[in-house]
Amino acid sequence: MAEAAKKQAEELKNEGNKALAESKYDEALRLYTEALSLDTSAVLYSNRSAAYSKAGNHLKALEDAEKAIELKPDWVKGWSRKGTALCYLKRYEEAKIAFEEGLKIEPDNEQMLSGLDEAESHLTGPGGSQPLRNPFQDPNAVSKLENHPKTAQFMKDPMFRTKILMMQQSGSMQNINDPRLIQCLGVLLNMDFSMMDGKDLPDDDDDMPPTTASKPQSPSRNEGAKKAYTSDHKQTNSKADSMSNEQKQAVAAKEKGNNAYKAKNFEEALKFYDEAIALDPSDMTYLNNKAAVYFEQSDYDQCIATCEKAVDVGRENRADYKIIAKALGRCGKAYQQKGDDFNAIKYLNKSLSEHRTPDIAKLINEIEKQMKEKERLAYVDPEKSLQEKTLGNQFFQEGKYPEALKHYTEAIKRNPDDAKIYSNRAACYTKLLEFTLALKDCDECIKLDPKFIKGYLRKATIYTAMKESEKAKHSYQKALEIDPNCTEAQEGYRSTLIQENSDPEAVRKRAMENPEIQQILGDPAMRLILEQMQRDPNALKDHLKNPDIASKIEKLLEAGIIAIR
């Protein structure tokens, strides 16, 4: 039976691999999940991790990658999946650790080296990495792609070939979101980009030894690859540290713009920022600063448009994710000022996904609260509330309390500041013996209108039903403070007094709360006398001769604490 399940899981995995290759991500996820219900293996978790990455659910991709590692910690692919998912989640420090763990298993794995480079480039910020050169402008690019086994099939598609030729002519590398373009980019740069963009093929054999993940290389070749990698990294840093004359002039113009901005000379600031943008259009900082000016001028549409342009420039030139987050955050704040809460939340969440800052997170919470309050207020309609209340009253009179409750609740939603509706619902809850909820509605009713006598009368009725006569009496007293001539309150108050006096246990309990009675019972001499009276009733005559003791015994008799037989 187990063998049959494993075979079925293998078939489902193969179908999932096919669906994944055809970009049918939901189908692939369904098939892998079904396979996992039959056979839990590292390969299936790894494949489903790849499918989740392609579908954009990177948290789920991370979960599956960790399960794959748990099942097979010495398999490099699990660490590869984990590093990839963490990169997409912008958790670059953790991604770096994952790739390093994978490299401990296979020190020369090109995929892991490429992933490590990607993670480190974000940790070092814009000073640690520069935009990739455009390999499509290589005169031999088309022939390389036509002759390479990974891309030859792509180039047979006329539409795709035209896209490559257009990129070659324009020099633009924007919007490379086609998996085939990612593959072509990797071929032209002699790098394996498949792993970093979640486009790597699913795994087919979980018995495959780790060393087969990449071809063994001779020591000299391995050493040469590492040296080349280190050399390229140093060159990138070197380029980042050096600045052209135009870039230096752009920085100087930006400083002038900043000074003008601080002086609130906004038109002058815009002029200098435009000058900086013309000198160095690849630096999104100048656009960010320009957007800040528009925000101060309350020109929110221009601010939003400039922020979006800044983000495009930043992504194209691999800007620091913190700067991108700042632009997205400003965009969200501009939408907030326009009263567009939906887009404000959208862009502020985008900012958080780039870089989490407390002020943006706090702002999101504030806007969400405002949105809920606006939604609540938009629902308020006193006229519809009255209609619902009338329906509730009809059902209440007919004894259909659940139906009445439904309409009273809707009436409260439509007009939450009407104390009378809470009172009506409290009566309904009382009929349904939901005393706690009834008391809660009474308290809300009294809170909204402290002079609404019906709220106290309802409360007293509930306490009477709960046999809490003292609390009922207190509620009637509150009602009488509002209207001393209220017949219902007067009769209710008298009724509670009679009830208290007719219940010996209640009388005794009330007496025990009396400080004078407590003092008498706390007197050691009186306790001895009471014990003596209990053993010998005739001793009472002798004690009554003492006026002080007689007075105390009389008080205990009146309170019902003791009785003389």
Image: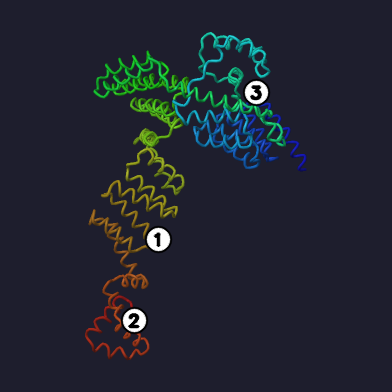
- Frontmost of labels 2 and 3 is 3
- Front position in the image: 154 or 513: 154
Above or below for 286 versus 49? above
Residue 308 image point, x, y percent: 41, 21
Q: Are marks 2 and 3 in contact (CB under 8 Å)?
A: no
Where does label 1 land, which residue? 466
Q: Which mark is residue 563?
A: 2
Q: Earlier in the sequence, mark 2 or mark 3?
A: 3
Q: Amino acid at mark 3?
A: Glu
| Image spot of residue 160 (x, y percent) | 61, 13
Q: Name the residue type under label 2.
A: Ala
Q: Mark 1 to mark 3: distance in Å?
A: 68 Å
Q: Residue 380, can we see it?
A: no
Using the image, tell me which numbered label, if any, was put on residue 255: none
Instruction: Identify the secondary structure beneath mark 3.
Output: loop
Q: At which x and y percent is residue 28?
A: 64, 30
**Near-viewer residue (443 or 302):** 302
